[in-house]
Image (cartoon, rainbow, N blue to C red):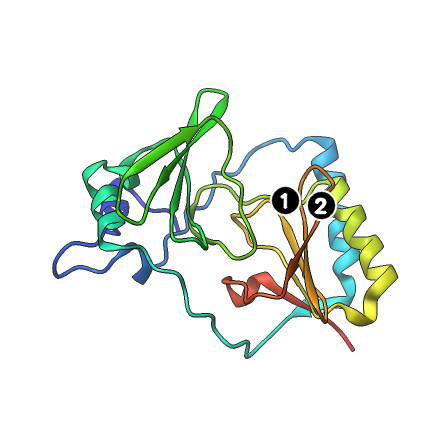
Amino acid sequence: MIFNKTQKESMIKIDGQMSIWDVEIIKKTEPISTIPKKVKQAEILFTEILTTIKPIGNEKSVNPLKLTDMQQEFLQKKNIMKNDNLSRVILYCGGGVGIEIKEASEFKTIYVSKEGKAVFEYYSKSKVLPMDKILYYTEVFLPNELQAKNLKSILNDVNSKVKKVIHRKGDENILIELDNNLISLIPNGWKLEFNLYPIDCKESEILIIKK
């Protein structure tokens, strides 16, 4: 579903209205006519790897992180959701909010504290941890060739320990839940390990290995 400016504005919480958290706020990208060859190859490889994986059903929901009233007020006063260059809004596990905006050929991320204050900004995409919640995104990320190969390697090496493969549409990372830990495959090829933690995502973004 594509949201127009009026709809995006209505996602900001004001008296008598729903908040950004109460509604579906995913904006799909416009179709493109050409896709780089490497992207096509990575997508094909990723699809092949997941041939033994199916969507999971009846998954218990995770209690979501929530924006504070001050953060809601900041989004409303600054007209963040009406910004045509808005890329993503990410609610970090620590309670802060990252507002990712595209400026020309680069991205700027603004960090907003729980108190609704813009504490700092930096020119880069926001880093996303498995524990973070992606509130809004405009681009569906495809795994690159490095991520696809790393996923294939892990599935070959520790297949019996893999419980889930998670690929959130607004997240550049691929998450692999094992028996005792969680691995995040990030675009540069690194494999980051975390303690097990409930991932806030949709059922359609959760995959499980067939037994």
Give the quarter of the image for residue 181: bottom right
Residue position for label 1: 142
Dot 1: few (<14), some (14–19), or many (≥20) neighbours within 10 Å? many
Q: Tell whether 103 sits left or right of 52.
A: left
Up-down relation of residue 210 to residue 41 (above or below): below
Residue depicted at 45% across the width and 42% down the height: 138
The residue nearer to you, when weighing 12 against 64, is 64
Which secondary structure lies at badge 1? loop
Instruction: Please tell me the numbered disc located at residue 99.
Output: none
Residue 47 lies left or right of residue 167; in this view the side is right
For residue 147, side relative to residue 140 (left or right): right
Task: Of the two numbered discs 1 and 2 on the same chain, state the one appearing first in sequence.
Answer: 2
Q: Is residue 60 above or below residue 141?
A: below
| Rendering coords of residue 24 (x, y %) | 36, 58
Amino acid type at image mark 2: Glu
Q: CA distance from mark 1 to mark 2?
A: 7 Å
Relative image position of residue 98 (x, y in whole percent): 41, 42
Quadrant where the C terminus is found in the figure: bottom right
Q: Are marks 1 and 2 in contact (CB under 8 Å)?
A: yes
Residue at the limit of the structure toward the top, as seen here: 104
Disc ID at residue 43:
2
From this view, report whether residue 22 is shown above or below residue 10: below
Category of crowding for the residue at label 2, using alpha-carbon neighbours closer than 10 angstroms: few (below 14), some (14–19), many (at least 20): some
168, above or below 187, in the image: below
The percent position of residue 111, horizontal first and vertical second, equals 38, 38
| Disc 1 residue type (three-letter) | Leu
Residue ID at (83%, 64%) = 158
**Tag 2, which secondary structure?**
helix
The single residue placed furthest to the left in the displayed view is 15
Q: Position of residue 59 (x, y in %)?
A: 55, 76
How many numbered discs, if any?
A: 2
